[in-house]
Image: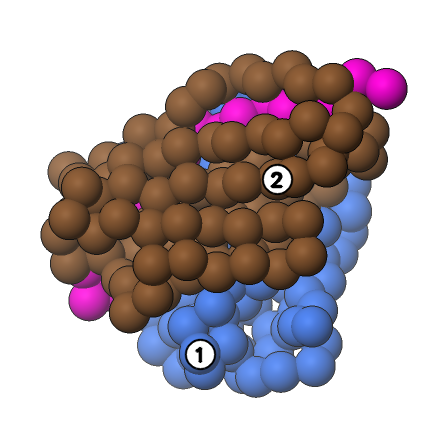
Chain colours: A blue, B brown
Amino acid sequence: GAVVSQHPSWVICKSGTSVKIECRSLDFQATTMFWYRQFPKQSLMLMATSNEGSKATYEQGVEKDKFLINHASLTLSTLTVTSAHPEDSSFYICSAMTHQETQYFGPGTRLLVL
Amino acid sequence: GENVEQHPSTLSVQEGDSAVIKCTYSDSASNYFPWYKQELGKGPQLIIDIRSNVGEKKDQRIAVTLNKTAKHFSLHITETQPEDSAVYFCAASIGGNNDMRFGAGTRLTVKP
């Protein structure tokens, strides 16, 4: 099946620093990737849709200057949390869409901002 | 906006019994309905999906049924095992977009 990786799997950072999370589709090309945020015991909340070679589309209420997304190639999308604050602590999950429009998820990145 | 409702929120069954999770959706243009299993601290894993041109799909102990008229779809797990314990999410595609909306999740516990 399709494999999606994320790096890092977890990160702890100080308030005010920026954190970059990478999402890679390992065995297929993905023109579209998605970034989700998940709070404990809650469902997945779509943050933005990342399209290769174009600007990301952000969901309402998600600050594009806070969560920078770059989809530089057909196998890589990055999410940068800029000037992170404790309230940004969460589980961030990406997914990549195959050409059959099936989404496969990465293993997630747990971010803790101190 | 488009909603996906999922029930129950928690489900506890005895090993070997069946488990059924139900979802309803509101967007009549939805045509793709995947189910994901999420274990603690991991990303969701696609376990089965169904498209609107079929009413039922089965893969070993897992089956999904779709009623487009009533706008609901269900996940059926037979002969449950303790390793089936996880949170299960349904999802529905949104109109002609690539977006999906997820249900709130069902925490399934299979007791040995």
The chain under label 1 reads A
Cα separation between marks 1 and 2: 25 Å
Circle 2: residue type: Ile
Residue occupied by mark 2 = B77
Quadrant (top left, top right, bottom left, bottom right) of the C terminus of chain B: top right
> What residue is at 43 percent from the left and 28 percent from the top?
B104
> Dot 1 surroundings within 10 Å: few (below 14), some, or many (20 or more)?
few
Q: Give the range drawn in magenta.
A: B95-112
> What residue is at 34 percent from the left and 66 percent from the top?
B54
Residue occupied by mark 1 = A100
Circle 1: residue type: Gln
Quadrant (top left, top right, bottom left, bottom right) of the N terminus of chain B: top left
> What residue is at 79 percent from the left and 17 percent from the top?
B111
Residue B25 at least partly seen: yes
Residue A85 vertical placement versus B12 (above, below): below
Residue A79 at least partly seen: no
Q: Do the residues labelled 1 and 2 touch (CB within 8 Å)?
A: no
Query: In front: B44, or B20?
Result: B20
**Across the whole image, how many numbered discs are drawn on residues?**
2
> What residue is at 77 percent from the left and 51 percent from the top?
A8
